[in-house]
Image: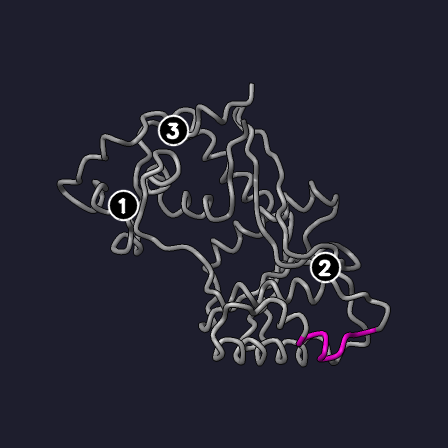
Amino acid sequence: MSYQISATKLQAYRRCPYAYYLRYERRLSSNEFFGSAALGSALHQALAKFHRDWHYNDPIPDMRWVSRCWDENSAGLTPTQIVEGRDILEGYYQKFVAGESSLRQPLAVEGKIQAYLQVENLEFCITGRYDRIDYLKDGLELIDYKSSREFKLPDADEMDLQIGLYYLALEQTYQQSLKYLSLLFLRTGEMVRYRATRKHKKQVQQVISHLAVRLRHDQTWEPTPNKQCDRCSYARYCPAVSSEPLPLPASLGASPELQLALSL
């Protein structure tokens, strides 16, 4: 069975191998909360319908199509959220659709991609999700919708890893290279484009190769102290943070994911 790897996992490994080991290899639960807000989820679903289900017989849809997409995906939201979401989608329409001569049909909308990479006799399955993939003249553009209230760009190093992973996955899936990874901030109407190159692909291959060596041979998983230590859910178990770290819970399995990841 392949060893599952994603941008989130690879970024966690690069920040601190020990925290990665506890979370993904030993499956030690944390107090972190992951998940999208209901409004953000509804916006993503409405935009998926907007681009996926438009018939493309006319150059561009009108506002009635925007309203229909929102009405079909806003059930369960509060009245305030419904109004807010409609305003956000209308802003999106005015910024990215109304001024175009025609609406381009995307290659794919809201789905998963994966790729495989063999390193150190391990098969890695690289997985990722996307909101939209567009054709360009010389490659592909992956668009990631951001619905958070705060306009905040990811750290450059983490963005480079994400670009590299998507580069690998899209190249294997569509036999075309990723040209741009774009973050589209729905509330502000801003779009930030990151140019993708083969350098990103090479970088992520090197990081995965380093992880493969550690999976095969390293039994220490040394921590990497950094500015995030004071927010780390595993700090109480970490010798780099505490002079007397707590022992790992006895209930944790002694066999990490590696036993299921061998490809021989």
Looking at the rendered structure, the secondary structure element under dot 2 is strand
Q: Is 82 drawn above or below residue 241 in the view shown?
A: below
Q: Would residue 50 be found to the left or right of residue 262 on screen?
A: right
What residue lies at 81% left-to-right and 65% top-to-bottom? 55
In percent of width and height, residue 137 lies at 80, 59
Q: Residue 165 carries which label?
A: none
Q: Is residue 193 left or right of residue 148?
A: right
Calculate the distance from the C-alpha at mark 2 to the C-alpha at mark 1. 40 Å
Q: Quadrant of the C terminus?
A: top right
Name the residue tied to disc 2.
134
**Is residue 27 placed above or below 225 in the rendered structure?**
above
The residue that disc 1 covers is 234
**Which residue is depicted at the point 71% across and 49% down?**
177
Q: Give the range drawn in magenta.
A: 59-67
Q: Which amino acid does label 1 sit on?
A: Tyr
Q: Which amino acid does label 3 sit on?
A: Pro
**Is residue 64 magenta-colored?**
yes
Residue closer to the observer: 93 or 157? 93
Horizontal side of 147 relative to 255 (left or right) equals right
Q: Residue at x 33, y 34 (%)?
A: 221
Q: Please report whichever mark, 3 or 1, sits nearer to the chain's N-terminal start.
A: 1
Which residue reaches farthest right? 57
Residue 256: which numbered mark, if any?
A: 3
